[in-house]
Amino acid sequence: MNKSYLKNKLIDYIKRIYAKLVFINDTPHKIALGLGLGVFAGIMPGMGILAALFLAFVFRVNRASALLGSMLTNTWLSIVTFLLSIKAGSAIMKLDWYQVYENYRFFLKNFQWANLFKASIFKLLLPLAIGYIVVSLALGLAVYLISYIIIKVIKNARKS
């Protein structure tokens, strides 16, 4: 496969996503909030598509955009959000992020079920959980705001 073929496929994919978001027959707020909730659920570990659909149902927002947001972020951003989450959680708890990261690597390398119940695991899981919540909320909010503005502008332009 050559680069131009891949580039064209990526551009077509982005155009399809754009068309799906813009031509949904719903308010810009409900579309954007669904997308933001989907991004939030897609980034949070253990959540995903089903959680995004559930959140969309609970908040009565657009389920298609929630599904799309979750699918776009579910696995694609995992490495980036993992590192951001460790850094954010460590900063909030005033810990060295690199030490938390090394503890995580050591934990995975020497994994045993019994270690999950030790008090020292909270020095690893708590900064990671706090970091994921902060990163997921921040990115979900950013996606909501950006997509709301874009969808509102496009829908207004189509009306006139």
Image (spheres, helix red, strand yellow):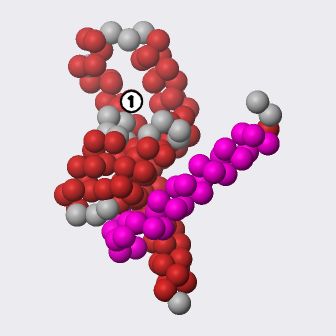
Drawn side of residue 46 relative to residue 103, left or right: left
Q: Nearer the viewer, residue 44 or 99?
A: 44
- Measuring 26% from the left and 11% from the top, which residue is drawn there? 114
Q: Tag 1's secondary structure?
A: helix
Percent position (x, y) of residue 68?
Answer: 42, 51
Note whether 146 is above or below 99 in the view shown. Answer: below
Camera-side residue of 143 and 15: 15
Give the answer, above or below, for where 2 lies relative to 152. above
Residue 138 picture quarter = bottom left
Q: Is residue 160 visible?
A: yes
**Left or right: where 54 falls relative to 28:** left
Which residue is farthest left? 58
User: How packed is label 1: few (under 14 Cα within 10 Å), some, or many (20 or more)?
Assistant: many
Please state which amino acid type lies under the numbered disc 1: Leu
Residues shaded magenta: 4-33
Quadrant for the N terminus in the image: top right
Q: Residue 118's x, y, as percent?
A: 26, 19
Residue 131 included in the magenta stretch of the image: no
Q: Which residue is mark 1?
A: 124
Q: Is residue 4 left or right of residue 61?
A: right
User: Total label count?
Assistant: 1
- Residue for point 53% across, 77% down: 154
**Does residue 8 belong to the magenta stretch?**
yes
Q: Is residue 127 visible?
A: no
- Write down the quadrant of residue 3 in the picture: top right
